Image (cartoon, grey):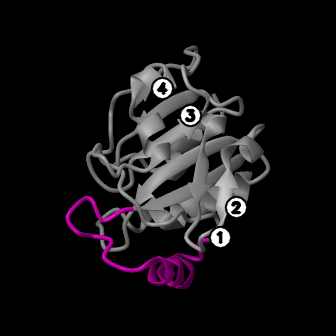
Amino acid sequence: MAANNNVEPLTSFYDLDITLNNGETLSAEKLKGKKLLLVNTASNCGYTPQYHQLQELFNNHSNELLIIGFPSNDFGQQEPGSDEEIEVFCKMNYGVKFPIAKKSVVIRNAQQNPVFQWLTDAEKNGWNDKAPDWNFCKYLVSEDGRLLAVFPSTAEPMREVKDALFK
């Protein structure tokens, strides 16, 4: 886990918009005051069962934490479904109630989701250049919009991520 809690972002996270899977736009500005856990997800991945732990983390800490899933088909073609299919899959199989963004690109290229452009560019977030290298990478953003930590796919939400939330 890489972490750098004291670096101010060079570009404000709160200038971003998040397009949800139902087409609605969520302004990051409205998320001030909560920690954010932003996770690139996929329905057909070996890490997909982490949805259970992500939902448990969300259930237990929804007053101070918002989790947003960002479905992506970037790794192993493991998210082939439409936004509607992804939503049904998450709700039916894992009881997901936290927001799911519109399916998008999380790896670095011209189509990269703007949220992941910010998360993976040190010139924007202040310190991190690491883009996801597989599904279920996790990025923790503070209540004031600083990137706090980056977790690999293997990091379990109810262990490593929870520990970082409440240091």
Crowd class of label 4 (few under 14; some 14 to 19; many from 20; radius 10 Å): some
x, y (%) of residue 6?
58, 14
What distance separates the C-alpha of mark 1 from that of mark 3?
A: 22 Å
Residue 164, disc: 3
Residue 11: in magenta span? no
Residue type of the residue flagged with mark 1: Lys
Secondary structure of residue under mark 1? loop
Q: Which residue is mark 2?
A: 59
* Residue 45 in which image quadrant: bottom left
What distance separates the C-alpha of mark 4 from that of mark 1?
A: 30 Å
Which is nearer the N-term, disc 1 or disc 3?
1
- Point 47% across, 45% down: residue: 114
Q: Which residue is mark 4?
A: 124
Q: Residue furthest front?
A: 110
* Residue 18 in which image quadrant: bottom right
Residue type of the residue flagged with mark 3: Ala
Q: Which residue is mark 1?
A: 97
The residues colored magenta run 72-96
